[in-house]
């Protein structure tokens, strides 16, 4: 008498298992390639930063006159301690903005009377001050020091938010740099400021469903030209100046949909393979 085992592999089952493995490898490879395509290339920021002629060399004095720059560029400006310096840059859905500020006092300002505290603030398109999740947003500059560096890392930008919440939304983000707690005799000293913003993509793990109809962009501002800073054209519409190079991508799509689809397909194939391997043989047995 010949008894066929329940888990005896057949040619069909082996072929099915091989197909499942090949399909899984193909799906995972496609998902990985899609995620790699969505990830920002580090060479882009380096290219933008190397183009010093396109980086602005002046700063605005209010929200309406904020100077626009792109992430990866190093915006510079000469001013005086006590001035409010403003810049604006775009942040899209799924990105986490990191703003770095550096203030340098020339040798002529070394004889100041006391220490001063510098602070960098970031506001969204509704001019709501966004909190820093980490970073030295405020730092004191000692009387014998000439350089201070500040950093503010924001929360990941969402595609949409409830009206009552203070969640960061895609659009323009303002940077304001100013000095606090400085003695009156030290106000008006010349300073040089450098501002740089990075907006790395956090991927589908931070993505949410929903869509913002219009990004929060300013109505009018000073847009830097090729010469840097405000040019002879003066102020003009800033929608193109603070828009990401690839345009706004706010929407419902994210790379987690691809992973969900791949997981569903692999689960279905695994179920079919398990049923094929575990089902009893229908081959008739000898009497």
Image (spheres, rainbow, N blue to C red):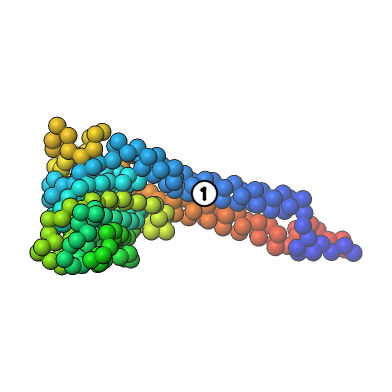
Given residues 236 and 140, the one toward you in this image is 140
In the rendered image, residue 162, in percent from the top left (x then y), is placed at 23, 61
The total number of labels drawn is: 1
Compared to residue 22, the image places residue 136 above or below, namely: below
Given residues 238 and 116, the one toward you in this image is 116
Work out whether residue 174 can be spotted.
no
Q: Considering the image in quadrants, where does the N terminus appear?
A: bottom right
> Which residue is at a point 65% across and 48% down the rendered structure image?
22
Compared to residue 116, the image places residue 109 above or below, namely: above
Work out whether residue 198 can be spotted.
yes
> Which residue is at a point 14% across and 42% down the rendered structure image?
220
Q: Considering the image in quadrants, where does the C terminus appear?
A: bottom right
Q: Report the residue that reaches farthest toward the left.
A: 184
Given residues 101 and 211, the one toward you in this image is 101
Give residue 236's quadrant in the image: top left
Q: Is 280 displayed left or right of 238 in the figure?
A: right
Helix, strand or loop at mark 1: helix
> Which residue is at a point 20% across and 54% down the rendered structure image?
108
**Label 1 crowd bin: few (<14), some (14–19), many (20+), radius 10 Å:** some
Q: Is 220 displayed left or right of 133 in the figure?
A: left
Q: Is 285 displayed left or right of 176 in the figure?
A: right
In the rendered image, residue 5, in percent from the top left (x then y), is placed at 79, 64
Give residue 142's quadrant in the image: bottom left
Residue underneath mark 1? 31
């Amino acid at each position: 008498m010949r008894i066929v085992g329940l888990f005896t592999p057949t040619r069909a089952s082996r072929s099915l298992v091989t197909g499942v493995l090949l399909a899984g490898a193909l799906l995972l490879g496609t998902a990985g390639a899609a995620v790699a395509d969505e990830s920002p290339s580090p060479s882009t920021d380096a290219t933008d930063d190397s183009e010093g002629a396109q980086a602005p060399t002046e700063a605005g004095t209010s929200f309406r006159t904020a100077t626009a720059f792109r992430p990866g560029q190093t915006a510079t400006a000469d001013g005086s301690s006590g001035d409010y310096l403003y810049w604006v840059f775009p942040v899209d859905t799924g990105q986490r903005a990191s703003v770095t500020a550096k203030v340098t006092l020339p040798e002529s300002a070394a004889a100041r009377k006391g220490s001063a505290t510098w602070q960098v603030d970031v506001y969204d398109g509704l001019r709501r001050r966004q909190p820093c999740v980490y970073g030295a947003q405020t730092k004191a500059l000692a009387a014998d020091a000439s350089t201070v560096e500040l950093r503010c890392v924001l929360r990941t930008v969402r595609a949409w938010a409830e009206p009552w919440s203070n969640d960061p939304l895609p659009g323009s983000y303002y940077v304001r740099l100013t000095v606090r707690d400085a003695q009156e005799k030290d106000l008006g000293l010349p300073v040089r400021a450098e501002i740089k913003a990075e907006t790395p993509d956090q991927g589908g793990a931070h993505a949410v469903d929903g869509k913002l109809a219009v990004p929060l962009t300013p109505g009018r501002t000073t847009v830097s030209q090729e010469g840097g800073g405000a040019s002879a054209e003066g102020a003009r519409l800033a929608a193109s100046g603070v828009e990401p190079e690839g345009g706004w991508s706010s929407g419902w799509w994210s790379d987690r949909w691809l992973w969900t689809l791949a997981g569903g397909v692999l689960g279905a194939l695994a179920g079919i393979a398990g049923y094929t391997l575990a089902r009893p043989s229908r081959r008739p047995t000898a009497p």
